[in-house]
């Protein structure tokens, strides 16, 4: 069973929330199906110089000898890791989820990023008044954060003295998976893995609570019992992947010079975004600039790039090219000349800024990199995830789903984003002191640039 989803979003969320079973079935057949599927669909017939037949010869006996589904999955994941590319992953069968223990549909209302060895709160929902941006997450439930991140390469700290190394429902297999996923990866991908591990502990069934210990701005330890609430937004599903909730948020901000700028943010590239995004652009046509906030947006349906970009491009322009083993698909910005109400309009021509971070992936990267490559947007924030490949999803004989890339993507100026990511024009590192003070450094830098861009565009009088 196969379906297309050229996105990182569905892959990242599904892999993050999948659980491992302890019962093996169809072991060799499953391994062979995964190996063959990749051989027949990989966009590079040479497998980037990897001897794919030799990989099969080495690993197939291990698959045959696997005594549990967990062991089998470890062998297949070893095979996928050797490709050295994003969008090659395994999603355990939903039939293996042990009831409520696998329910990760709700979160406590804040997001985190790993900064050096600190897991910092970077965003807080309005309905969570007792948590602040910039707070350091010290413990989630019974597990110290230091115990979660020390297994990642490059982390300096080991387990906290006297703290448990694992919490309920999370054991050595999770930590071993973290090591395997992160070995050889860049700091950005280590940060992604840290985020994934944190999310599997922060999230849980709606209505349940999680105890989180923080260090506030003064160095004081505070504990909050936070209720997990269901994700807000429009529910969407793709194939056999978990339900996602699409959110489009719009706000108006003032620049240092007093200009009005619209900020549009959305969390995943799905078709439901298009109509809401168009309404937001219609409301902001008279703004002095627009900022698109793609921080934390791991991707989605890549075809949407052509429509979203058309709100800001007055003529057809190629943003990039997706290359498969047999063909090429050009992603072309198509000017949007009609408003949501059917009126004739011109695409927004004012300054456009895009915000990204280490959790911006796939379609977010292709869009941002494409707009950057044609000179239509200036990018602010941190380098993006570097996982920009389109993927297919195939059901394996044991019920697991194999995610595998079938194409590569380069921007219009020839930049390959896989492994590199989008490099912002103005890199703005996450700074704890600024977070504690309530500042949003990348957004503030974008607002200041919009003032400069408008000043440069203004008529010069003698």
Image (cartoon, rainbow, N blue to C red):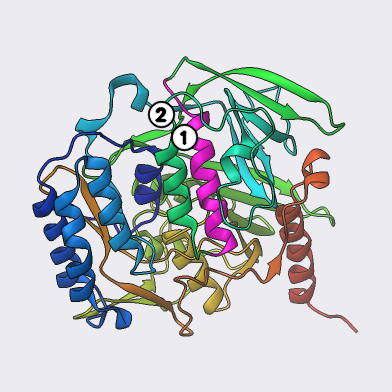
Q: Is residue 426 above or below residue 437?
A: below
- Dot label at residue 104: 2
CB contact under 8 Å: marks 1 and 2 = yes
Q: Is residue 23 left or right of residue 375?
A: left
Quarter of the view holding residue 50: bottom left
Q: For numbered disc 2, what is the local secondary structure?
A: loop
**Element type at mark 1:** helix
Residue 419 seen in render = yes
Residue 455 lies, in percent from the top left, at 80, 71
Q: Would you say the magenta stretch is mainly helix, strand or loop?
A: helix
Q: In the rendered view, would you say 193 is above or below 56?
A: above
Mark 1 or 2: in front is 1
Residue 430: x percent and y percent? 72, 53
Indicate left or right for 332 with 192 as reference.
Answer: left
For the record, the magenta segment spans: 186-205
x, y percent for residue 195? 54, 44
The answer to which image quadrant residue 240 occupies is top left
Location of the C terminus (image quadrant): bottom right
Give residue 276's mark. none
Magenta-drawn stretch contains 329? no
Query: Which residue is rendered at x = 44% and y = 63% of the image?
Result: 387
Camera sees residue 298? no
Q: Earlier in the sequence, mark 1 or mark 2?
A: 2
Q: Residue at x 43, y 19 (%)?
A: 206
The residue lying at 62 percent from left, 56 percent from top is 291
The residues tagged by marks 1 and 2 sit, at their Cα atoms, a distance apart of 7 Å
Q: Is residue 35 above or below residue 244?
A: below
Q: Which residue, given by chain and number where applicable, does mark 1 sit on? A: 200
Disc 2 crowd, CA 10 A, few/some/many (<14, 14-19, 20+): many
Q: Position of residue 91 (x, y in %)?
A: 28, 45
């Amino acid at each position: 069973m196969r379906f297309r989803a050229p996105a990182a979003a569905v892959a990242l969320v599904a892999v993050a929330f999948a659980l491992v079973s302890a019962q093996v079935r169809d072991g060799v057949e499953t391994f062979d199906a995964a190996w063959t599927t990749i051989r027949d669909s990989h966009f590079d017939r040479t497998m980037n110089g990897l001897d794919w037949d030799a990989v099969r010869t080495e690993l197939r006996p291990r698959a045959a000898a696997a005594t549990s589904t967990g062991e089998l999955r470890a062998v297949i994941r070893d095979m996928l890791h050797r490709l050295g590319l994003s969008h090659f992953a395994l999603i355990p069968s939903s039939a293996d989820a042990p009831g409520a223990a696998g329910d990760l549909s709700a979160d406590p209302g804040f997001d985190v990023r790993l900064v050096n060895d600190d897991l910092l709160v970077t965003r807080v929902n309005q309905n969570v008044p007792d948590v602040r941006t910039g707070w350091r997450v010290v413990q989630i439930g019974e597990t110290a954060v230091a115990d979660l991140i020390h297994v990642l390469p490059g982390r300096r700290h080991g387990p906290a003295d006297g703290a448990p190394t694992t919490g309920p429902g999370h054991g050595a297999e999770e930590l071993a998976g973290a090591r395997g996923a992160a070995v050889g990866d860049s700091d950005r991908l280590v940060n992604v893995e840290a985020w994934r591990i944190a999310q599997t502990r922060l999230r849980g069934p709606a209505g349940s609570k999680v105890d989180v210990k923080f260090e506030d701005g003064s160095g004081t330890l505070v504990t909050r019992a936070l209720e997990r609430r269901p994700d807000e937004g429009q529910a969407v599903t793709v194939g056999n992947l978990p339900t996602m909730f699409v959110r489009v948020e719009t706000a108006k901000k003032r620049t240092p010079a007093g200009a009005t700028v619209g900020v549009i943010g959305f969390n995943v590239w799905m078709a439901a975004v298009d109509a809401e995004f168009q309404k937001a652009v219609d409301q902001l046509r008279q703004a002095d600039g627009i900022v698109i906030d793609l921080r934390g947006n791991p991707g989605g349906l890549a075809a949407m790039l052509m429509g979203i970009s058309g709100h800001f491009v007055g003529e057809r322009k190629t943003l990039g090219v997706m290359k498969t083993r047999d063909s090429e698909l050009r992603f072309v910005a198509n000017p949007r000349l009609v408003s949501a109400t059917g009126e004739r309009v011109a695409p927004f021509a004012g300054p456009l800024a895009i915000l990204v971070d280490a959790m911006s992936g796939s379609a977010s990267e292709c869009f941002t990199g494409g707009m950057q490559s044609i000179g239509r947007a200036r990018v602010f924030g941190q380098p993006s995830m570097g996982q920009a490949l389109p993927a297919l999803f195939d059901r394996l004989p044991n019920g697991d789903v194999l995610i595998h890339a079938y194409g590569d993507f380069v921007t219009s100026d020839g930049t390959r984003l896989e492994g590199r990511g989008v490099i912002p024009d103005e890199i703005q590192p996450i700074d704890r002191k600024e977070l504690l003070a309530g500042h949003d450094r990348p957004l503030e830098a974008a607002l200041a640039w919009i003032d400069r861009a408008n000043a440069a565009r203004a008529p010069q009088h003698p």
